[in-house]
Image: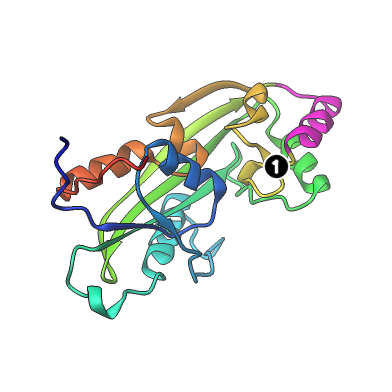
Amino acid sequence: MSKTPENHPELILASTSATRRAILNNLKLPFSAIEPQFIELHEALSQPRRRALENGRGKALSIPVPITQLGSLHRLVIGSDQVCISATGQTLHKPGTKDRAKDQLRQVSGQWVTFYTSIVVAQCGKVLKQAVIPSQIKFRSINDIQIERYINADQPFHSAGSILIEGAGLRLIEQIKTADVNALYGLPALKLMDFLQELNVELSYQS
């Protein structure tokens, strides 16, 4: 008979992102997802690494703390954010439209792009752990016909850099440099597991 973990706080993901939820689901982690009440910072902070971190912190700290859980270990909140930067230092936002996605993909064709993905663990309105994981991808040289076909296939309008790396976007990539491919997907899973271990958190496997 397996032993029930003694230190098993409630895990909250401060995001409604389907990709981030999928990462935690694949880890078989028991969690709930709550939409953060936080307006993301964009060019207000010039350093992309810091911007990703502050947005991750803001999301995690925006989740309300139940009064009955103040000072307890029953809720840990996970916040994350991703900032995408082109080779020329330009922030590549979520395109929102097909025309903007086309423009972004033309811009990054044959170029390296850097993603800064933050991971923040907070409890009772206090940040316990935080980090930013950098990742780089090099796009293949892609023409307008390939761009059109890709956009029609993946509809990457809500993804920074106009690419779903976890989807058909992988076909546009020539090389990847990262310590954790999940960071490219939007949530640094390896660093999250490091943090939970450092906090002596033992979570059961979600069936």
Image quarter (top left, top right, bottom left or bottom right) of the C terminus: top left
Looking at this view, is 32 or 196 the one in front? Answer: 32
The residue sitting at 53% across, 56% down in the picture is: 16
| In the rendered image, the vertical position of residue 168 relative to residue 97, given as above or below | above
Residue at 54% x, 69% y: name it.
39
Instruction: From the image, tell me which residue sits under label 1.
Output: 156
In the picture shown, does residue 159 fall above or below 123? above
Q: Tell me the quadrant of the picture where the N terminus can be found.
A: top left
Q: Position of residue 166 (x, y in %)?
A: 57, 32
Give left or right: position of 151 versus 56.
Answer: right
Left or right position of 66 against 146: left
Residue type pointed to by label 1: Pro
| Residues rendered magenta in the picture | 141-154
Q: Residues within 10 Å of mark 1 (few under 14, many from 20)?
A: many
Main secondary structure of the magenta stretch: helix
Residue 88: say if magenta: no
Residue 188 in which image quadrant: top left
Q: Secondary structure at mark 1?
A: loop
Where is residue 118? Give x, y as percent: 40, 49
Query: Which residue of the protein is positioned furthest toward the bottom in this rendering?
Result: 67
Image height check: is 114 above or below 20? above
Measured from the top left, where is residue 123 in percent x and y?
26, 65
Comparing 155 with 161, the one in front is: 155
- Picture mark count: 1
Farthest residue to the front: give it.
Answer: 1
